Amino acid sequence: MKLKTNVTKLVGKVIVPGDKSISHRSIMLGAMAYGTTVVNNFLLAEDCLETVILFKTLGADIEVDSETATVTINGGGLQSLTQPNEDLYVGNSGTTMRLGLGVLSGVPFMTRFKGDESLSKRPMERVMAPLREMMAITFSEKGGDTPPIIMLGTSRLRGRTHKMTVASAQVKSAILLAGLSATGETVVEELEQTRNHTEQMIQQFGGELTVSDKTIRLIGPQVLTGTTVVVPGDISSAAYFIAAGVLVKDSEITLPNIGLNPTRTGILNVLESMGAQYKIKNKTEGSEPRGTIKVCSSDLKATTIEGNIIPTLIDELPIIALLATQADGKTIIKDAAELKVKETNRIDLTAEELNKMGAKVTPTEDGLIIEGPTPLKAAKVSSHGDHRLGMMLSVAALLVKDGDVELENVDSIRVSYPSFIEDLTNLVESK
Ligand code: S3P
């Protein structure tokens, strides 16, 4: 697809779709709970719909109203799920597979999880090892780390203490979801604090857990009750408009109702340290705070991003790399080796694709070094099937003055934001 280039300014408001992480969890907890759960502003994108399909395949009563982005789940508790007579195919969605394994470790039947080409290369032992310690039988069919994954759950799951070896909200969440049906105490000691939507939502469904520093404790088994979940806009999707507004001269973009959970807002800290201008308005408090983000064009300076901020902006690193290509000086991103095992190797491919456009990005073992500012030029680029690379490159194209930017595999954006290109184009005033 030929991307919009040579844009003079971006002005207007974008209603960013619902948060992906929260949408996934609302379906899982809704299906594990007793009673009705209503999810408002559910993310109607491929990834979250994989979670809906998975739980429907397991017999859960779920209705999706696409007009209103509302999902209704009539939950009958975890034990009402039934053994499917087909494989559980979850497409590109790592969250569906990893958290789904956690849920299904607590039911006494066997399932076989499969994913698309990208997911079939992603590490699953990090989830299977702790679930095995809790007494589930689970293994990679190929004998290694990657899908297809067999899960033989049990109604005799045991709580255990897990010391995390990677900073991963998906692994933590899989363990906590298993802990809900395990007997005894499940403890997760995090390496770094990662997004805490699972902890927040378990409590919203009437579950109990304690969090002290980086340790989460939950005593099972627990009975959850259906509730109403109002999903905020996804800050990881908003990030592309934030970057676009900062980078394109004379722009002003308003993004209402964005989730501002502090375990997700690392990008805002980075914007501040780069000198970007933004404001937060109408902020609500609560377990999943939200507010309006307003950004306008700004001159940027380089920064260093490392340590415990990394999990709070892990999905935003490709778009932060783009910001850094336009910042004055050398931006260093470290401690982000996890980027190599996302939907693609985002360290190598962020560098490769931005360099095609004339940027100076060097991949390292655990991050990126970006020298700026560099003008971006026309090129043929690819998302490599990774939604976040596709969206980042669409924003990069806006800055190209002459010639075309051709994006291969634009369809991958559907994974988290089907109307992204349309929403971006609606802000554009081109020459
Ligand atoms: C997610 C956690 C992160 C993130 C992913 C969604 C979640 O993955 O990259 O997009 O919903 O828990 P990891 O747990 O692998 O860091």
Image: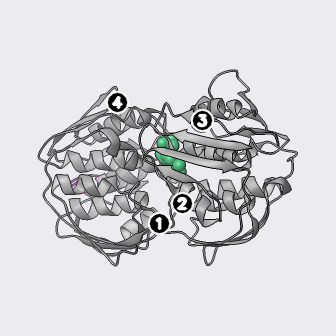
Q: Is residue 18 above or below residue 55?
A: below
**Residue displayed at 50% across by 60% down:** 417
Q: Nearer the viewer, residue 244 or 190?
A: 190
Which disc number belongs to residue 161? 3
Mark 4 sits on what residue?
366
- How packed mark 1 is, by other alpha carbons closer than 10 Å (few <14, some 14-19, many 20 or more), is some
User: Mark 1 or mark 4: which comes first in sequence?
Assistant: 1
Locate residue 84 relative to residue 367 in the image: left or right: right
Q: Given this view, does label 3 or label 2 mark the residue nearer the observer?
A: 3
Q: Which residues are magenta?
A: 399-403
Provide the secondary structure element on which disc 3 rests: strand
| Quadrant of the rendered image containing residue 245 | bottom left
* Marks 2 and 4, how far apart at CA: 30 Å
Three-letter amino acid code of the residue under disc 3? Thr
Three-letter amino acid code of the residue under disc 4? Asp
Which disc number belongs to residue 418? none
Q: Nearer the viewer, residue 341 or 373?
A: 341
Mark 2 sits on what residue?
200
State whether residue 141 appears in this view: yes
| Quadrant of the rendered image containing residue 420 | bottom left
Which disc number belongs to residue 288? 1
